[in-house]
Image (spheres, grey):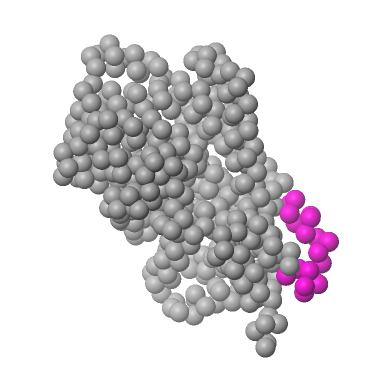
Amino acid sequence: MSLLKDPVFWTLALFLVPLVVRVPIGVSLGFASFLIVWLWDMGYQMLSYNFFANIAKFPLLAIPFFILAGIIMEKVGIAERIVGLIKQIVGDITGGLAVATVIVAAFWGAVSGSGPATVAAIGLILIPSMAQAGYDKAFATATVSVASGLAIIIPPSISFIVYGDIMQQSVGAMFAAGVIPGLIVAGFLCFTVYLMSRRHGYKGQPRGNAAVVLKSLADAFWGLMTPVIILGGIYGGVFTPTEAAAVAAFYGLFVGLFIYRTLTFRILYDILRESVVSTAVVMLVVACAGLYSWLGATVGLIDKIAGVLLGVSSNPTVILLMINIILLFAGMLLDANSIMYIFLPILIPIIRIMNWDPIWFGVMMTVNLAIGQVTPPVAVNLFVGARISGLTMEDIAKPAIPLIIAAVLALAVLCVFPILTTYLPTLMKLM
């Protein structure tokens, strides 16, 4: 009976039970928080203030702007032109289109900062192109879906913004720290898709002559400049990451309206509608997850879970392995931003006790959660890929397994060698 009177038990139960019956994550978090605060008389009057305070933060303004920028650049044709350039460069070499897909996903991650958005942006172009060139459609879809996980590792990244807000770390330092790890993960994926393509004899399409390649380069030039402007402006001290997001959105509008002239009122309406919906979903999760984190700290849930983890072993390697396993399983069920709000308050005391660098830990955690985006049963990237290709999740899951293994190996390398993460921000004197 004492368990049924324990707010810690009900804080977990009222969150997990709705989640199991497929209630949206934001609603589950908000429902559990409101009910516990009300039943245990913890001051329901503060709920509205707490809800507002969780999203009324300057760094979080970058989220809607980066979402807007990514959708603009997809709709005005920037993604299509970049894909066209890469296809011309790789030509018909073995596995060329598969390797190019990973490279394009990494590049597009420097624009959108969202895994599912990257799948949607490049999948509509690359999946049919790879199938037409003789690639197995399931393999093509798996490659696009897994490689698009790079979008939350390669800066700018919405997950880095969320992590920096929770942990009170420099978003600029997080962006710099994500560059080398993102390239390492991309390298592991490129090697894996090459081996798989070589085994099955997959090739690309013959490239055009020099004039065609140069024309593709000219068409893609304005798109290629996007990450240069965003990241160059941040690290050059011209603007903050939040201001960079606004600059990226206006840059996309400029290119669509005056350079490519593909922006119409109808497309602009679609852009704004998709941006509002995507931003509302993210911000609802952020607000409710922040409320749930406060509740977990208040009732003692965070201390109890942290105590259990530390009670298993005092060995940092064992603790780190346990954390990664927990995060991998969490990534199978929840989105990356929700996991950060739910788990980081629990992990903060462990990070401090183990004296781990918070920048390194944030990048490692984000790589882990990027893998979760392609790991069933939820696997949001695979889900979007399945909708685009017309295949089932089961069709895509099998060719995705070697790519997931490659990403896990890359994660292991980043865990063993923290210098790979901290080198660039240290060199740039951001930490």
Percent x, y for residue 116? Answer: 47, 43
Residue 25 can be seen in this image: yes
Question: Which residue lies most toward the bottom here?
Answer: 1
Q: Nearer the viewer, residue 122 or 313?
A: 122
The quadrant holding residue 88 is: top left
Span colored in magenta: 36-53
Q: Left of 98 or right of it: where is 245?
A: right
Rendered position, 225 above or below 378:
above
Residue 91 image offset from top left, x and y in percent: 23, 26
Q: Quadrant of the N terminus?
A: bottom right
Q: Residue at x 35, y 18 (%)?
A: 217
* Location of residue 412 in the rendering, given as x and y in whole percent from the top left corner: 34, 58
Image position of 112 with respect to 55: above or below: above
**Left or right side of 207 for 260:** right
Magenta stretch encompasses residue 52: yes
Q: Residue at x 52, y 53 (%)?
A: 335
When the figure is inspected, residue 180 is found, relative to residue 93, above or below; the finding is below
